[in-house]
Image (spheres, grey):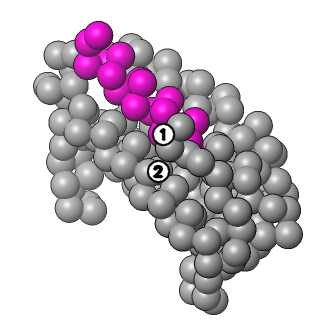
């Protein structure tokens, strides 16, 4: 298994576990938030999906996007299923982009996000993207525990 295959496996496993968690959010808890300043459950799902779209654009640009126009921006919040359906084609394009790189590209291509404090190799950037989603999965687990929702076993 090469590095690209491992990166794809990681992205697919992170997303599989996220979806398992997201689908366990009861409809009446989608707008629940632990405090007034926090994202709601559905906003967090959207944040993860929209961030992946942004990161994909940044990878294609080899750096931050100065003027980012999000296709998610005007989309009304409804259900997790609707979020996943809308984001599906963007996810497919992102996965195809990952497949287009070589193991060597992971080391030599730089992603310049110096505007937010870093320049990283492409491989590092891919791991950061998956980590971002994983952090929000943990955060959402805490939300649901606090809201007294039965948690799914994402550690299968």
Residue depicted at 73% across the width and 53% down the height: 24
Q: Which residues are magenta?
A: 1-18
Q: Position of residue 100 (x, y in %)?
A: 39, 14
Q: Quadrant of residue 41?
A: bottom right
Whether residue 26 is situated above or below residue 57 in the rendered picture: below
Q: Residue at x 14, y 25 (%)?
A: 108
Picture residue at 73% right of the left edge, 49% below the top = 23
Q: Residue at x 53, y 37 (%)?
A: 156
Q: Is residue 6 magenta?
A: yes
In this rendering, the answer to whether 91 lies above or below 70 is: above
The mark tally for this picture is 2
Residue 120 included in the magenta stretch of the image: no
Q: Are marks 1 and 2 in contact (CB under 8 Å)?
A: yes
Q: Quadrant of residue 135?
A: bottom left
Q: Is residue 74 visible?
A: no
| Front label number (1 vs 2) | 1
Q: Label for residue 80? A: none
| Residue at the far left in the pictured view | 108
Where's residue 35, x and y in %? 61, 88
Locate the N terminus by quadrant: top left
Q: In the rendering, which numbered label is found on residue 133?
A: 2
Q: Position of residue 132 (x, y in %)?
A: 41, 53
Residue at which label 1 appears:
14
Horizontally, residue 74 falls left or right of residue 15, namely: right
108 left or right of 38?
A: left
Q: Is residue 109 visible?
A: yes
Q: Dot 1, how many residues are within 10 Å of its Cα: few (below 14), some (14-19), or many (20+)?
A: some
- Where is residue 133 shown, x and y percent of the image? 47, 50
Is 47 positioned to the left or the right of 89 in the image? Answer: left
Magenta region's main secondary structure?
Answer: helix
**Residue 136 located left or right of residue 111:** right
């Amino acid at each position: 298994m090469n590095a690209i295959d491992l990166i794809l496996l990681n992205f697919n496993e992170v997303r599989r576990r996220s979806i398992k968690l997201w689908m366990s959010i009861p409809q009446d808890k989608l707008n629940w938030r632990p405090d007034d300043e926090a994202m709601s459950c559905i906003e967090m799902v959207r944040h993860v999906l929209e961030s992946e779209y942004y990161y994909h654009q940044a990878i294609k640009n080899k750096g931050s996007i100065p003027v980012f126009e999000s296709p998610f921006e005007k989309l009304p919040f409804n259900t997790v299923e609707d979020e996943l359906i809308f984001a599906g084609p963007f996810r497919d394009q992102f996965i195809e982009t990952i497949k287009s790189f070589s193991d060597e590209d992971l080391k030599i291509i730089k992603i310049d996000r110096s505007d937010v404090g870093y320049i990283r190799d492409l491989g590092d950037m891919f791991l950061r993207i998956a980590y971002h989603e994983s952090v929000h999965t943990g955060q959402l687990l805490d939300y649901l525990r606090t809201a007294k929702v039965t948690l799914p076993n994402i550690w299968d």
